[in-house]
Each structure stands twice: as structure tokens, then as C-alpha cells.
């Protein structure tokens, strides 16, 4: 309470709504730099704020040890995870290919997608691919580099709604529901049905995967799954809350665990790990961290549109200046309905900095959904950038008994 009194005396500002949590380094840093985090910290419930910050310390054998600091995670309420759901979908798609264990079928195998139900579409080509043909690997590249929604939808269709839920649940991700496509306009019933896939090379057919229908009906039941005062549909304002019960959801803790499972799989028990080859892991790591201009995809070479921090909010999200070569943000973010989510492993080769950071907040002042009137630039992205920057600055000054060897993540040359 003493901290509140000092802040109020300094200029009649509203009190910060931060818990008295001695030893919580995240809270200490936010309080110390409170002016950079207003107005969010004055009313964090309104902004639906959640943060998970994880320090990493290595022992003499370079084995990492994790210390977590959370904020507003103990009373989880629904938030829309937007494109952050794409990372576990990419991991599961690679795992599924490995489990199929079929000759000539891998992430680079060309494929065709057939439509079997209303609203679905057929895919024979991909103009952004070097050979003009779609593949699971190229969809993952597009997801991680520019957050392509169609690419995610194709992975969703390859995996299927039931497979997505069950494969994550068996690994212990109970708070992960990936049950719909993105920006497709499809309802709950249509999202239960997924397309047929054919993997081929030239005239040779390697694998046919039939269309699938989830026999169960999935719905999310948790506090705050209905939100807001109204929603825009087809240009008309509907004066009722938006219902997210048939949308996607992943908790903040699950989101961060997906990143950790890629970089530090040995920190999980075997049953929680993904069946990824070392080449798969390095593939994910490269495209989680590369700038669009480094991706090798010609369509993303225009740095005026695809700047270095494109779809990355921490540290540099509020600027378009080039990112320094010594800092890498391996991440998968999300942005929709006023929600901003970022989920990252941040490293600095020069300073020996490494930490995990996951955060979500919503900037939707009028509480109308789908009207494209959100305070991303005014409040949301600056908050995310400053959060990343202050934690990074602290990490640079934080003493470490053992300097981490981060060379294994430098996969960009």
C-alpha cells in the first residue's frame, strides 16, 4: 500500500492495481516503471491483463533452471488467443508426419487439398512457394514469419478438430482448445469437418488422407466466454455480447509451455514432449526467429511492409526500425478483437540474456467486437514493447553464476 500512496502523491494519478507480492520480480519491475504502463496497470481487469515471465539460469553443465513470475494468472478468464494458436498446430503437424512414418511423406512433400463440404476450398497451388506447390513445411514458414491465416487453416484441416484436442490433452495441455479455423466465417458444425489431403510427387501418389468429421461437439465453458456490449455482423450492430464458446482458447501457461517445449524439450517429462526430430526443432526455431526479409520467401522481401518486428510486439513492436543482429525474438503472437498476445523466448547473444515471456491484454474501449475500433497503436502495442524492453534491460543487469551458451540458437547464417 505504501507504493500506491507514493504514486498518488506524485501527481494525482490513479493508484496502480498491482498485488502486494513480495519477491515477485515481475511486479517489482512493473511498479518501478509504472509510468510506462499506464493506463493498463490502473485497471488491469478492464484490460484483461495476464503476464508470465520466466527467468532462466544455467548450471555448470548448461542445464537450464526456470523461475516463474506471474501476474493475474490465478483466476483465469477467457481471452481470445487469435494467431497464437498457430504454434501448437505447427508442432502437431510435424509430429503427425513423423508418426505416419511413410516413405516420401514429409514436411516438404507437395500436397493437394480437396473440399468435401460447404465453405471449404480446394488447393492445388501456392504462389509464395519456390516451386509453386503447397506443403506442410511451407505453410509452417508462412505461419511463423507473417502469421498467414490460410496457412493455419490448412494445418487445421490436415490435423482435424478431434485430433488437435486429443493430441494436446494427452500431453497434459488441458487448457488448449483449437476448435475452429481463422477468418473463415464457418460455424461450429462446419469446423467439425476437415478436408481430404493427398501427398504426391510428380505422377506418384504417396498418401491419401480422407476427410474427417469430429463425432463430438466441442464448446468452451469458462468465465467470461461471452464478452462486450455488442458485435458487428455484416455491417450491422447486434446489441448482445459476442459468444466465444465455439472459438479457440489456450491458457497463458500452456502458451509458454509450447515455446519451452521447442527450445527445452528435456525440461518436460517424456510424456509431455512432442515427437519432433532435431531438424524439425531447428526448422521451427529458424522461422520463429527470422525477420521476414531473411525467410527466403520472395513475397515477404519488401521491408516497408514486412519490417523486422512484423508480428512481434515485445521490445520493438512500437517501431519499424531494423532490429539489432545480437537480439532475437523467437515468438508467435496474436491480434484480433482488441486482444494482443505475444509468446516469446528472447535472447541476446552479446549480453548472454535469455528469458521467456508471455502476455495478453485487450484494448477495446467501446466493448464492441468486430468493428475494427481498437486501441492497438495507442495503448496495446506500446505496452507490449515496453514490457519486453524493461524485462530485457533487467535481464542484462541480472547477475548469473554461469553465462549461457546461446550459440545453438544462432541458425540464421
Image (tube, rainbow, N blue to C red):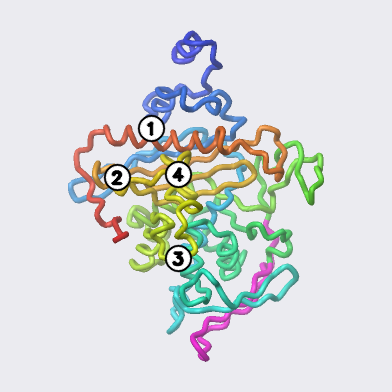
- Which residue lies at the image location 48% right of the left edge and 14% below the top edge? 4
> Real-space Cα distance between discs 1 and 3?
33 Å
> What mark, if any, has residue 297 been given in the picture?
3
Pointer 4 with pointer 3, Cβ within 8 A: no
Where residue 225 sits: x, y (%)? Answer: 68, 43
Give the mark, 3 or 2, whose residue is nearer the N terminus. 3
| Disc on res. 320 | 4
Cα–Cα span, label 4 and label 2: 19 Å
On residue 390, the disc is 1
Q: Do the residues labelled 1 and 4 touch (CB within 8 Å)?
A: no
Q: Distance between the residues labelled 4 and 3?
A: 20 Å
Q: Where is residue 139 in the image (x, y as percent from the top left)?
A: 51, 67
Residue 40 in view here: yes
43 versus 356 height, above or below: above
| Residue 69, picture quadrant | top left
Of the numbered discs 1 and 3, the one sitting upstream in the chain is 3
Crowdedness of circle 1 by 10 Å Cα count: few (<14), some, many (20+)?
Answer: some
Measured in 3D between alpha carbons, the distance from the residue under mark 3 to the one under mark 2, in whole angstroms, is 25 Å
Disc 3: CA contacts within 10 A as few (<14), some (14-19) or many (>=20): some
- Image depth: mark 4 or mark 2 in front: 4
What residue does disc 2 label?
348
Alpha carbon separation for disc pair 2 and 1: 14 Å
Amino acid at each position: 500500500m505504501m507504493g500506491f500512496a507514493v504514486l498518488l502523491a506524485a501527481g494525482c494519478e490513479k493508484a496502480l492495481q498491482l498485488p502486494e507480492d513480495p519477491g515477485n520480480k515481475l511486479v517489482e519491475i512493473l511498479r518501478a516503471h509504472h509510468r510506462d504502463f499506464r493506463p493498463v496497470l490502473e485497471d488491469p481487469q478492464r484490460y484483461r491483463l495476464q503476464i508470465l515471465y520466466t527467468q532462466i539460469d544455467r548450471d555448470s553443465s548448461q542445464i537450464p533452471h526456470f523461475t516463474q513470475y506471474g501476474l493475474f494468472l490465478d483466476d483465469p478468464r477467457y481471452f481470445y488467443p487469435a494467431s497464437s494458436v498457430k504454434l501448437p498446430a505447427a508442432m502437431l503437424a510435424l509430429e503427425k508426419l513423423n508418426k505416419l512414418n511413410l516413405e516420401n511423406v514429409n514436411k516438404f512433400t507437395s500436397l493437394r487439398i480437396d473440399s468435401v463440404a460447404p465453405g471449404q476450398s480446394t488447393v492445388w497451388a501456392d504462389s509464395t512457394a519456390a516451386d509453386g506447390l503447397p506443403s506442410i513445411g511451407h505453410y509452417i514458414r508462412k505461419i511463423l514469419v507473417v502469421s498467414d491465416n490460410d496457412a493455419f487453416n490448412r494445418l487445421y484441416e490436415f490435423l482435424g478438430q478431434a485430433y488437435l484436442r486429443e493430441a494436446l490433452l494427452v500431453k497434459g495441455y488441458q487448457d488448449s482448445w483449437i476448435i475452429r479455423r481463422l477468418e473463415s466465417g464457418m460455424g461450429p458444425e462446419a469446423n467439425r469437418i476437415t478436408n481430404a489431403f493427398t501427398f504426391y510427387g510428380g505422377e506418384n501418389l504417396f498418401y491419401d488422407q480422407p476427410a474427417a468429421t469430429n463425432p463430438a461437439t466441442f464448446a468452451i465453458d469458462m468465465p467470461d466466454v461471452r464478452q462486450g456490449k455488442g458485435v458487428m455482423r455484416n455491417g450491422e450492430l447486434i446489441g448482445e455480447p459476442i459468444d466465444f464458446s465455439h472459438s479457440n482458447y489456450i491458457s497463458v501457461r500452456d502458451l509458454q509451455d509450447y515455446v519451452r517445449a521447442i527450445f527445452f524439450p528435456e525440461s518436460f517429462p517424456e510424456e509431455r514432449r512432442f515427437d519432433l526430430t532435431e531438424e524439425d526443432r531447428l526448422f521451427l526455431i529458424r522461422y520463429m526467429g527470422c525477420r521476414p526479409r531473411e525467410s527466403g520467401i520472395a513475397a515477404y522481401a519488401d521491408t516497408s511492409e514486412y519490417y523486422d518486428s512484423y508480428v512481434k510486439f515485445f521490445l520493438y513492436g512500437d517501431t519499424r526500425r531494423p532490429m539489432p543482429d545480437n537480439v532475437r525474438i523467437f515468438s508467435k503472437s496474436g491480434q484480433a478483437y482488441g486482444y494482443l498476445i505475444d509468446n516469446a523466448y528472447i535472447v541476446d547473444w552479446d549480453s548472454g540474456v535469455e528469458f521467456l515471456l508471455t502476455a495478453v491484454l485487450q484494448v477495446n474501449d467501446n466493448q464492441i467486437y468486430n468493428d475494427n475500433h481498437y486501441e492497438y497503436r495507442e495503448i496495446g502495442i506500446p505496452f507490449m514493447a515496453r514490457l519486453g524492453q524493461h524485462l530485457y534491460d533487467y535481464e542484462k543487469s541480472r547477475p548469473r553464476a554461469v553465462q549461457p551458451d546461446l550459440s545453438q540458437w544462432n541458425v540464421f547464417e
